[in-house]
Image (tube, rainbow, N blue to C red):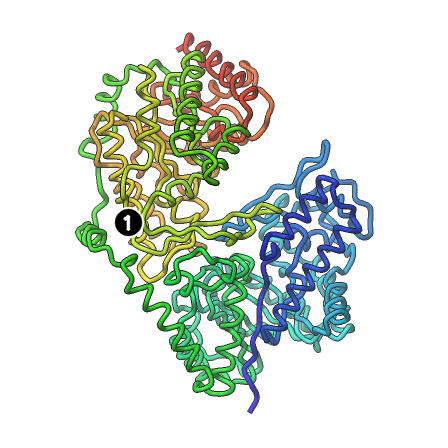
């Protein structure tokens, strides 16, 4: 009988010890020659392929590896290179490639944005109606041949499909879409033809856009495109790959003339299997079944998963079934092996890229050679998960009881904003257009190195505390001298706005090497929320109270909100997302209470990540946003009427979530606006926002000092649509990445501009 195959969709680029990042950064800073750089990169690339081969994966992806970003690779392949980079036909130099990603002299970098609902960012392709795509160099063919020659791997080339590519691009009108698509189709065909000639049998074409909510018209593009492919390369097998969600138009998708369909059975809420049960699966196609979670880090319960596979085998025969992760493994760290500081009960229950590949291979073995051949593995996986589930970490009674006691209604402040406003005005006595900042102040080299010394034990706790206090004192004085109205303590004690809290809360774990790529060479090491979250003792009171003791002006307390903490972590999946968020919110509620008790009565709860966690499907967005509002309010509403709750979000596209923002019911919100003033203002024209609001009046991402005039113009523009009595003056975001000698002059001008505008109102 023919057998089930194992497959993979993509492998992490960064290396076990971030060797990839190091090579890139050394090359950029000219410590590595191009030749040396390419040699090192090739070695890494081949080692990843070899690892996959050795683990027993039948269909190994080729071309998922990248020097920066796989969308950029695809743009470059098709000559979609913005004019400002002056590229002439032919292969694209490394210099041009990295310039698109990072900017060069006058040519600003292309924009970058989030890849669906992950924390990975891709480089947005720039296309206009006149763009004439062409093939610069068939990199996919080169990589396919390389793997064959060097490792004897007959790989499965991977490319982002044309419809997803165009849907993620910017710079053209909707009506130009079909023409642009038609200019790309022959180029894809050319790439495919070369691959077919070189001997490739399967090619994976990623169209994750199929997992979003599409219009009927867009579906017809799929038909046109894939029919064209089929006619041109009838002997090349195309696997149409989707991930991150179910496909809404299952029947349309399975009738496309492709030879295989890749579906996500982990993040589809059961919808893909339901579709198969209802409509069957075509007899002439392979099914690539994503059943090992490709983007979270928990070990696969093999028994359950085998049941799932057997369920699928009722609808498709073994010879056409592939087992694979639910999406590219680029979203998880490389291997658990090196994590020797994790508690065994946790370490045993997690699985990163290498371990996930092993799970795929084990599952395949279980089906091909019989359940009995993998009994040990089944037992181990079940036990590991059981042990964690029954551990004290996941069974804190007080937390469980608190969650159970919560009602369904949105937690609500006793008085509506209009009435709180009067009380708060009286209490705070702030001038019109109060000035403030977003929280962090410059994190200088000295501050980072002090933290290192303390972490390494070279400095005692009290030495470090004293150092932090000195910085707080220095900057309270600076802010007073600048005549800022609402001060901050500066967040000098914090490395990162999630890690700082995670390290102090119960239920979080931190790894040593579990990095994932965020964008370019930038990697993040997300905390793991593995147990019940609880506050042991106050996290921020000491620094905030100290800062407040130094001044008569209000100092804002600074916290990170529940949704942001959730979205920037790897999170347990044995209880609902909503419950985890509620646990975090309850811990923050206690922290807020402690701040109030210590006379911190302006408290900012940052939620920069609400928008980026939005689900892909329209129907799921409502629940997500409801939950976000619920947990923000759960954390923030149980305060005195005179206590002023602030929040901050650093992005400017609000159309989709403006109602949510309103419902958070924060007394003051500060948002990014400097880089997109026009857009922002129109949002607020359409939607009357009647609580305190600060639209960032200058861009903190740039080192240049904004002039008084510029800031005044920003303020005046905003005041055309926003009531001056509600308007706050602040920079776009935190100032931690700026130097003191950039920050002080900028804030000086901000205060000066405010004073001049005040006179007119
Ligand atoms: N309070 C944080 C800071 O100022 C907010 C950071 C953010 O919005 N990402 O750094
Ligand atoms: Zn921000």
Give the residue drawn at x 55%, y 92%. 1
- Residue 179 appears in the picture as rendered: no
Vertical placement of residue 326 versus 640, above or below: below
> Which residue does the numbered mark 1 point to in the structure image?
583
Does the beta carbon of the residue at mark 1 sit less than 8 Å from ligand 1? no
Residue 576 vs residue 133: left or right?
left
Residue placed farthest to the bottom in the image? 1
x and y percent of residue 44 in the render?
Answer: 68, 59
How many labels, in total? 1
Residue 128 locus on image (x, y percent): 68, 45
Quadrant in the rendering for residue 426: top left
Q: Badge 1: few (under 14), some or many (20 or more) residues near its Cα, within 10 Å?
A: many
Residue drawn 36% across the image and 56% down it: 530
Residue 629, position in %: x, y? 31, 43
Q: Quadrant of the C terminus?
A: top left
Q: Is residue 289 visible?
A: yes
Mark 1 element type = helix
């Amino acid at each position: 009988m023919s057998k089930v195959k194992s497959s993979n969709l993509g492998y992490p680029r960064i290396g076990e010890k971030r060797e990839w990042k190091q090579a890139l950064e050394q090359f950029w800073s000219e410590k590595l020659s191009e030749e040396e750089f390419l040699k090192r990169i090739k070695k890494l690339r081949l080692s990843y392929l070899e690892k996959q081969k050795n683990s027993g994966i039948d269909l190994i992806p080729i071309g998922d590896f990248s020097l920066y970003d796989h969308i950029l690779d695809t743009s470059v392949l098709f000559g979609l290179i913005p004019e400002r980079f002056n590229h002439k036909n032919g292969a694209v130099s490394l210099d041009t490639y990295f310039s698109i990603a990072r900017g060069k002299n006058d040519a600003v970098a292309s924009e970058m944005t989030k890849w669906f609902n992950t924390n990975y960012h891709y480089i947005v392709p720039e296309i206009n109606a006149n763009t004439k795509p062409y093939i610069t160099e068939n990199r996919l063919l080169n990589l396919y041949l390389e793997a064959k020659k060097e490792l004897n791997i007959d790989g499965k080339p991977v490319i982002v499909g044309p419809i997803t590519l165009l849907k993620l691009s910017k710079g053209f009108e909707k009506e130009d879409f079909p023409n642009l698509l038609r200019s790309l189709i022959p180029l894809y065909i050319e790439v495919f033809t070369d691959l077919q000639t070189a001997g490739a049998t399967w090619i994976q074409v990623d169209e994750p856009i199929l997992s979003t909510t599409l219009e009927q018209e867009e579906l017809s593009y799929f038909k046109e495109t894939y029919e064209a492919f089929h006619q041109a390369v009838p002997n090349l097998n195309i696997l149409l790959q989707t991930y991150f969600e179910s496909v809404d138009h299952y029947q349309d998708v399975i009738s496309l003339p492709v030879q295989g369909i890749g579906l996500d059975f982990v993040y589809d809420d059961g919808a893909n299997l339901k579709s198969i049960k209802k409509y069957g699966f075509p007899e002439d196609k392979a099914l690539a079944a994503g059943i090992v979670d490709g983007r979270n880090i928990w070990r696969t319960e093999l028994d359950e998963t085998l049941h799932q596979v057997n369920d699928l085998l009722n609808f498709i025969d073994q010879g056409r079934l592939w087992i694979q992760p639910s999406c590219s493994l680029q979203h998880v760290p490389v291997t658990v092996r090196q994590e020797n500081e994790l508690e065994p009960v946790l370490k045993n229950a997690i699985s990163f890229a290498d371990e996930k590949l092993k799970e795929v291979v084990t599952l395949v073995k279980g089906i091909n050679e019989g359940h009995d051949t993998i009994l040990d593995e089944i037992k181990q996986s079940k036990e590991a998960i059981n042990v964690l589930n029954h551990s004290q970490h996941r069974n804190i009674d007080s937390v469980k009881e608190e969650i159970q006691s919560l009602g369904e209604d949105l937690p609500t402040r006793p008085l509506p904003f209009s009435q709180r406003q009067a009380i708060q005005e009286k209490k705070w006595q702030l001038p019109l257009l109060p000035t403030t900042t977003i929280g962090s102040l410059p994190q200088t080299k000295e501050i980072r190195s002090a933290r290192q010394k303390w972490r390494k034990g070279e400095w005692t706790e009290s030495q470090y505390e004293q150092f932090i206090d000195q910085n707080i004192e220095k900057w309270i004085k600076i802010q007073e001298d600048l005549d800022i109205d609402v001060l901050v303590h500066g967040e000098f004690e914090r490395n990162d706005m999630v890690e700082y809290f995670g390290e102090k809360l119960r239920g979080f774990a931190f790894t040593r090497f579990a990095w994932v790529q965020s964008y370019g060479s930038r990697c993040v090491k997300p905390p793991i929320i593995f147990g019940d979250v609880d506050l042991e003792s106050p996290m921020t009171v000491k620094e905030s109270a100290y800062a407040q003791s130094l001044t008569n002006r209000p100092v804002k307390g600074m916290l990170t909100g529940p949704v942001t903490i959730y979205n920037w972590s790897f999170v347990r999946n044995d209880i609902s997302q909503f419950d985890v968020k509620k646990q975090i919110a309850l811990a923050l509620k206690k922290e807020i209470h402690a701040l109030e008790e210590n006379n911190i009565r302006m408290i900012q709860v940052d939620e920069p990540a609400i928008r980026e966690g939005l689900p892909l499907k329209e129907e799921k967005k409502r629940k997500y946003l409801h939950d976000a509002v619920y947990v923000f309010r759960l954390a923030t509403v149980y305060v005195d009427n005179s206590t002023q709750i602030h929040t901050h979000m650093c992005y400017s596209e609000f159309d989709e979530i403006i109602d949510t923002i309103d419902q958070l019911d924060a007394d003051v919100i500060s948002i990014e606006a400097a880089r997109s003033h026009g857009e922002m203002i129109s949002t607020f024209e359409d939607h009357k926002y009647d609580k305190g609001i600060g639209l960032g009046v200058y861009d903190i991402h740039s080192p240049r000092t904004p002039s008084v005039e510029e800031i005044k113009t920003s303020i005046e523009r905003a005041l055309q649509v926003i009531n001056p009595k509600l308007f706050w003056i602040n920079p776009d975001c935190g100032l931690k990445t700026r130097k003191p000698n950039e920050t002080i002059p900028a804030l000086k001008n901000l205060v000066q501009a405010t004073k001049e505008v005040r006179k007119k109102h």
